[in-house]
Image (spheres, rainbow, N blue to C red):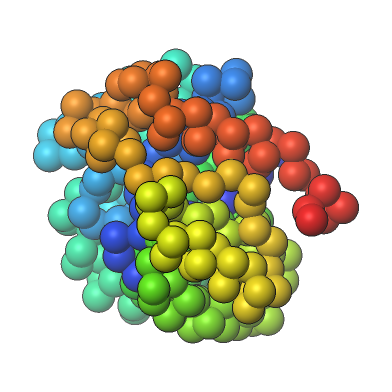
Amino acid sequence: MGRIIAVANQKGGVGKTTTAINLSACLAEKKKKVLTIDIDPQGNTTSGLGVDKNNVENTIYELFLEECTLSDCIQASVMEGLNVIASNINLSGAEIELISMENKEYLLKDKLDTIKGDYDFIIIDCPPSLNLLTVNAMVAADTVLVPIQCEYYALEGLSQLIHTIDLIKERLNPKLEIEGVVFTMYDARTNLSSQVVENVKENLNKKIYKTIIPRNVRLAEAPSYGMPINMYDGRSSGAEAYRFLAEEVIEREDEDEWL
């Protein structure tokens, strides 16, 4: 049975989409069968995996509105073993249309329950807000992975996100857990980055990945070429970091393996 991981942080610019793209690709590189679902209306995960978001006939939006089947909107990415359910700007109006639907929080879960066994991992890239789309992702997910940027305000908003996860666990998805926190955009040249890491470790009673994603030019360039980092520059520090993260995600199947 596959594992469903929602990549979420309501703060923008923390490396959420970069993590969704490159964790998915590095899991696929390790011969895992992966489905990446883009539920961010910006569609950056879609284009970052080599799919033209403006020319996709069936996206997550059509799936939510029951205008297509799940198999209609699953498509190949640039990476072998990695499929994508695309998103584009059409999704931005979905929340208004979904609000009147019955069991609206379970729309994604009901769909994914039918194919969960077909994949080793299903990675969901959430929008940078705690809206109905994010709720759908968390209701469908087994765990939530939280990227945190190594900056002064790293902890700001995190308590709200954790509160939301706790509420969803209490009311909608009792199995939901926090997969862990991963630090992104780490700059070894500044004391601030290391101070932030220490501060979060001291103040956050949550699981924290050993892997720290560096601030890396090649990571920033890769999406404009429609490629994950392991294809764009497999020897870069960014590619190596996401490979290590993928290994940790694969290894940490149970609680005992966490520090």
Across the whole image, how many numbered discs are drawn on residues?
A: 0
Q: Residue at x 22, y 34 (%)?
A: 221
Q: Position of residue 78 (x, y in %)?
A: 33, 20
Along the line of sight, the residue nearer the viewer: 110 or 89? 89
Residue 44 lies, with reference to residue 33, above or below; the image says below
Q: Is residue 84 left or right of residue 178?
A: left
Residue 152 lies, with reference to residue 181, above or below; the image says below
Q: Is residue 219 left or right of residue 195?
A: left
Along the line of sight, the residue nearer the viewer: 147 or 174? 147
Instruction: Give the quarter of the figure containing the C terminus.
Output: bottom right
Along the line of sight, the residue nearer the viewer: 78 or 132? 78
Q: Residue at x 65, y 58 (%)?
A: 208
Task: Tell me if residue 81 can be seen.
Answer: yes
Instruction: Give the quarter of the figure containing the N terminus.
Output: top right
Q: Position of residue 35 (x, y in %)?
A: 49, 35
Residue 166 lies, with reference to residue 38, above or below; the image says below
Task: Tell me if residue 76 can be seen.
Answer: no
Q: Position of residue 104 (x, y in %)?
A: 44, 71
- Tell me where residue 144 sits by quadrant: bottom right
Residue 185 lies, with reference to residue 99, above or below; the image says above
- Tell me where residue 27 sits by quadrant: top right
Along the line of sight, the residue nearer the viewer: 211 or 72? 211
- Tell me where residue 109 sits by quadrant: bottom right
Q: Residue at x 35, y 29 (%)?
A: 228
Q: Position of residue 212 (x, y in %)?
A: 53, 47
Q: Is residue 185 left or right of residue 105?
A: left
Q: Residue at x 82, y 48 (%)?
A: 257
Question: Residue at the left extreme?
Answer: 54
